[in-house]
Image (cartoon, helix red, strand yellow):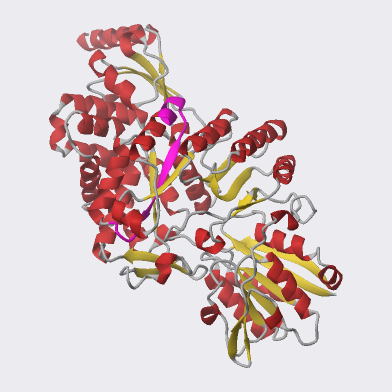
């Protein structure tokens, strides 16, 4: 009996290898394949040392190696394929996935007839490929969806038809392919995307059509995930909330979570033009205590860019309405942008972020623009003036865009410094009350405030840990790493919190608007209101720093203050108030949903945790709770005692 080893090198540890699961589950429905082959799976993260993975693969007695190929692992896959070919010249290797499909000239060797590429959806092609290998002289030219070399000439067969009835592919959850040894489950309820966004291959790969898995099957898979206590759920659909049944599925997820205690974290890619449905879904997850934040994938607000990338956003007025609704319901949301996209300029990028802040955006993340194989932008790269550089080290094969026809490389760098400054200042709420007042009452613009702070940070030099992190990330393209932005938050709100606090203070004091007494009072509110990512980060508020507010006392994770009457309206406009107390006395309670920082955890763990927390920053913002007047009386007595002692 021949052996097939399916290899998945993922971003996250202990994640269900869904692609391999589908391939195996479908292949064994074929009588020839099931009688001729046995299947094994090898999964690890792409950051695992290359030599360790190579050793494990070479120990296998597999006849066929199947690799799932993505931008984050392709460099590693290339190296492993070469190692396997040298050590096992008679082994057969099949590569599949979005990084290699339709790219045979780039990834195949004309002297190697035993390595092939699967172009497109894999289940049928992979099964027919295995059937062909059972013959003494495999006839790959009779298998649709393959590219391979024969007599040093490249052969690409006809396209394989998409699977219209997805239930022809058995569920790897429900048929025993997967066991319970996972922490993260990937769930797919449909395949396809009706959009053709220029930076994305999803819609181009599926020709508009969205095919669905059976509703009852999906419900059973959700139940399986919950019963097996898999804590994290990634919904892999391109547009969660696009179909009406997605709301029902979301309720089913929460019902199963309440019954079985899992999953307790849900991630999804929100439907592009169904914001109210997505808000409904996020409310369902929030009400069931599944820590969730509503994602809004805008990518850019620049009309020229939207036209070039064939993308249609929701109207800004509708976005503002939704943001206000989310704010009232205390549901976190985060906006996803991409920098730089064709048609975007440095000024439009800055202006777009400012516009989002004006419309109550809670968290905004500007992801790097990856030049992905087979996308419309990939095919028009020269016309659009795309300049890219390699990123991700040896494991990845990422090309990040650092220039376009509208953005020079120096302007790209300036935009990145701008985003790191914005990320540190706005996404952490470090100057929220002040900036809202400056914009609403003094007519300033958010983008000017963030640009000034970016310039302030750049003057600090490489000896400063806050600036140095951003500088090294931009220089070395570390922003490609999924955990990079999260670890920056770890730095400014934990590791170097006192340094960053002093930066914010000195920056504010250096601005002309610091002369406004209202600004100084709101600054003190901001210092009290800044969140803590971890439950054991030392509290850094000092009583001697307060001149406009009256600092009364501190608790283990709280502070009690009195806010003068003239500042109460601004307070209510910028923080989470749980009622307006008599005398304006508040207990600022920081004990929320944070986990403690554990020094034994890896740097990646801290980055991933903080990135997830900043996306739903509303869940860790302090509550301003009404307090009675006892603290005021106690404080007054204490002050009298101090004064009397001084007079003696």
* Quadrant holding the N terminus: bottom right
Residue 355 at x, y percent in the picture: 28, 41
**Whether residue 636 is situated above or below residue 319 in the rendered picture:** above
605 part of magenta stretch? no
**570 lies left or right of 320:** left
As drawn, the residue found furthest toward the bottom would be 151
Which of the 4 image quarters holds residue 23? bottom right
Residue 237 at x, y percent in the picture: 58, 50
**Whether residue 153 is situated above or below residue 67 in the rendered picture:** below
Please tell me which residue is depicted at 32% across the width and 48% down the height of the picture.
Answer: 301
Does residue 476 appear in the picture of this structure?
Answer: no
| Highlighted magenta segment, given as a residue range | 325-344
Please tell me which residue is depicted at 40% across the width and 24% down the height of the picture.
Answer: 576
**Whether residue 143 is situated above or below residue 315 in the rendered picture:** below
Which of the 4 image quarters holds residue 136? bottom right
* Quadrant holding the C terminus: top left
* Residue nearest the viewer, comparing 468 with 27: 27
Please tell me which residue is depicted at 17% across the width and 24% down the height of the picture.
Answer: 517
**What is the tally of numbered marks visible in this picture?**
0
**280 lies left or right of 406:** right
* Residue nearest the viewer, comparing 511 with 93: 93
Does residue 201 appear in the picture of this structure?
Answer: yes
330 part of magenta stretch? yes
* Residue nearest the viewer, comparing 346 with 307: 307
Please tell me which residue is depicted at 39% across the width and 60% down the height of the picture.
Answer: 369
Residue 367 at x, y percent in the picture: 40, 54
**166 lies left or right of 238:** right
Residue 296 at x, y percent in the picture: 44, 43
**37 lies left or right of 231:** right
Which of the 4 image quarters holds residue 378? bottom left
């Amino acid at each position: 009996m021949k052996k097939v080893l399916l290899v998945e090198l993922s971003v996250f540890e202990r994640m269900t290898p869904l692609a391999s699961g589908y391939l195996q589950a479908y292949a064994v429905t074929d009588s020839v394949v099931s009688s001729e082959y046995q299947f094994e799976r090898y999964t690890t993260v792409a950051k695992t040392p290359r030599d360790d993975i190579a050793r494990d693969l070479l120990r296998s007695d597999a006849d066929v190696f199947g690799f799932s190929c993505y931008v984050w692992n392709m460099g590693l896959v290339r190296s492993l394929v070469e190692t396997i070919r040298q050590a096992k010249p008679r082994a057969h290797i099949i590569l599949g996935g979005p990084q290699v499909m339709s790219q045979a000239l780039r990834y195949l060797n004309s002297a190697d007839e035993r390595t092939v590429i699967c172009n497109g959806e894999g289940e049928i092609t992979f099964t027919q490929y295995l059937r062909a290998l059972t013959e003494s002289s495999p006839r790959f030219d009779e298998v649709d969806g393959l590219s391979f070399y024969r007599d040093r000439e490249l052969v690409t067969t006809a396209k394989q038809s998409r699977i219209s009835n997805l239930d022809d592919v058995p569920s790897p959850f429900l048929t025993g392919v997967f066991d319970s040894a996972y922490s993260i489950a990937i769930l797919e309820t449909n395949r396809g995307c009706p959009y053709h966004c220029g930076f994305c291959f999803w819609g181009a790969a599926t020709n508009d059509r969205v095919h669905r898995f059976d509703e009852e099957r999906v419900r059973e898979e959700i139940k399986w995930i919950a019963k097996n206590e898999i804590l994290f759920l990634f919904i892999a659909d391109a547009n969660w909330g696009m179909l009406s049944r997605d709301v029902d599925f979301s309720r089913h997820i929460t019902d199963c979570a309440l019954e079985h205690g899992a999953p307790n974290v849900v991630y999804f890619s929100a439907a592009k033009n169904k914001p109210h449905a997505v808000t409904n879904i996020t409310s369902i997850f929030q009400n069931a205590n599944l820590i969730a934040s509503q994602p809004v994938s805008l990518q850019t607000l620049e009309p020229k860019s939207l036209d070039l990338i064939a993308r249609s956003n929701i109207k800004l007025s509708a976005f503002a309405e939704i943001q206000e609704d989310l704010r009232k319901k205390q549901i976190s949301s985060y906006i996803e942008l991409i920098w730089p996209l064709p048609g975007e300029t440095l000024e439009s990028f800055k202006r777009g972020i400012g516009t989002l802040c004006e419309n109550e955006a809670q968290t905004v993340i500007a992801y790097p623009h990856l030049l992905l194989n087979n996308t419309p932008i990939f095919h028009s790269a020269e016309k659009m003036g795309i300049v890219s550089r390699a990123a991700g080290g040896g494991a990845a094969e990422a090309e990040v865009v650092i220039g376009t026809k509208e953005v020079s490389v120096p302007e790209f760098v300036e935009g990145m410094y701008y985003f790191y400054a914005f990320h540190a200042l706005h996404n952490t709420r470090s100057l929220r009350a002040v900036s809202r007042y400056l914009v609403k009452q003094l007519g300033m613009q958010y983008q000017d405030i963030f640009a000034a702070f970016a310039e302030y940070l750049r003057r600090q030099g490489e000896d400063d840990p806050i600036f140095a992190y951003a500088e090294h990330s931009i220089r070395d393209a570390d922003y490609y790493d999924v955990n990079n932005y999260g670890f920056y938050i770890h730095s400014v709100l934990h590791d170097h919190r006192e340094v960053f606090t002093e930066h914010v203070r000195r920056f504010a004091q250096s601005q002309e608007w610091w002369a406004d007494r209202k600004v100084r009072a709101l600054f003190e509110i901001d210092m009290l209101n800044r969140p803590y990512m971890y439950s054991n980060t030392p509290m850094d508020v000092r009583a001697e720093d307060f001149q406009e507010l009256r600092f009364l006392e501190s608790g283990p994770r709280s502070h009690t203050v009195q806010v003068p009457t003239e500042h109460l309206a601004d307070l209510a406009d910028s923080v989470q108030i749980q009622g307006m107390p008599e005398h304006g006395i508040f207990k600022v309670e920081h004990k929320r949903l944070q986990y403690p920082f554990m020094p034994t955890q890896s740097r990646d763990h801290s980055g991933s945790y903080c990135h997830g927390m900043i996306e739903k920053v509303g869940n860790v913002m302090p509550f301003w709770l009404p307090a009675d007047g006892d603290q005021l009386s106690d404080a007054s007595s204490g002050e009298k005692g101090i004064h009397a002692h001084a007079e003696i």
